[in-house]
Image (cartoon, rainbow, N blue to C red):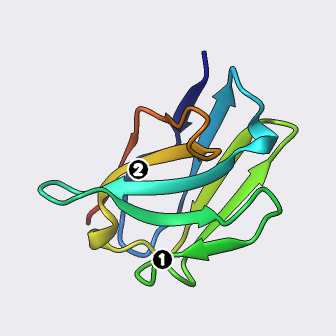
Amino acid sequence: QGQLVESGGGLVQPGGSLRLSCAASGFTFSTYVMSWYRQAPGKERELVAGFTSVLGNTFYANSVKGRFTISRDDVKNTVYLQMNSLKPEDTAVYYCKADRGSRYITYWGQGTQVTVSS
């Protein structure tokens, strides 16, 4: 059974940085397209950053472009989200997702809380 486990969240001051990690197990990580979502209180879950395919092209939400960077390590079966210049509006629970199309199971992590506050 596949599993995703996020880590690296926490409390950070505005302007600070955090690096989130999402460790995968139980499925062939390199064949899945990985992405990061977030959900703030009272809001819908939104796509933050992701890969367009396993080849490595990336995309970002306009709200994080230039501040966040997604990367993956297929040896360590881990996807990362480097978050710089954090703002209070980045406060949310961050989730990673592994997707391989409709014929395969989509995996979600349990989420990690990021709070940006002074």
Residue 59 position in % (x across, y down): 60, 74
Whichever of callouts 1 and 2 sits on the residue coming sooner in the sequence is 1
Which of the pair 3/86 is nearer the observer? Answer: 3
Q: Secondary structure at mark 2?
A: strand
Q: What's under tag 2, amino acid-wise?
A: Tyr
User: In the image, what residue occupies the spot 48% across and 77% down?
Assistant: 85
Residue 116 coordinates in the image, percent (x, y): 32, 62
The vertical placement of 20 against 62, above or below, is above
> Who is closer to the viewer here, 14 or 64?
64
Report the residue marked by disc 2.
Answer: 94
Q: Nearer the viewer, mark 1 or mark 2?
A: 2
Work out whether 56 lies above or below 9.
Answer: below
Q: For label 1, count other residues whose C-alpha is less than 10 Å away and answer few (under 14), some (14-19) or many (20+).
A: some
Query: How many marks do you count on the picture?
Result: 2
**Mark 1 secondary-structure assignment:** loop
The picture places residue 63, in percent across and down from the top left corner, at 40, 81
Q: Is 40 placed left or right of 94 in the picture?
A: left
In the image, what residue type sits under mark 1?
A: Ser
Viewport quadrant of the C terminus: bottom left
Decide if residue 64 is on the left or right side of residue 44.
Answer: right
Pick the residue in front: 27 or 72: 27
Q: Quadrant of residue 67?
A: bottom right
Q: Residue furthest left?
A: 42
Which disc is residue 75 wearing?
Answer: none
Decide if residue 100 is on the left or right side of residue 37: right
Q: Nearer the viewer, residue 52 or 50?
A: 52
Q: Bin the neighbour count of mark 2 within 10 Å (Cα to Cα): few under 14, some 14-19, many 20 and up.
A: many
Position in image of residue 33 (x %, y %) = 67, 52
* Residue at the spot of label 1: 85
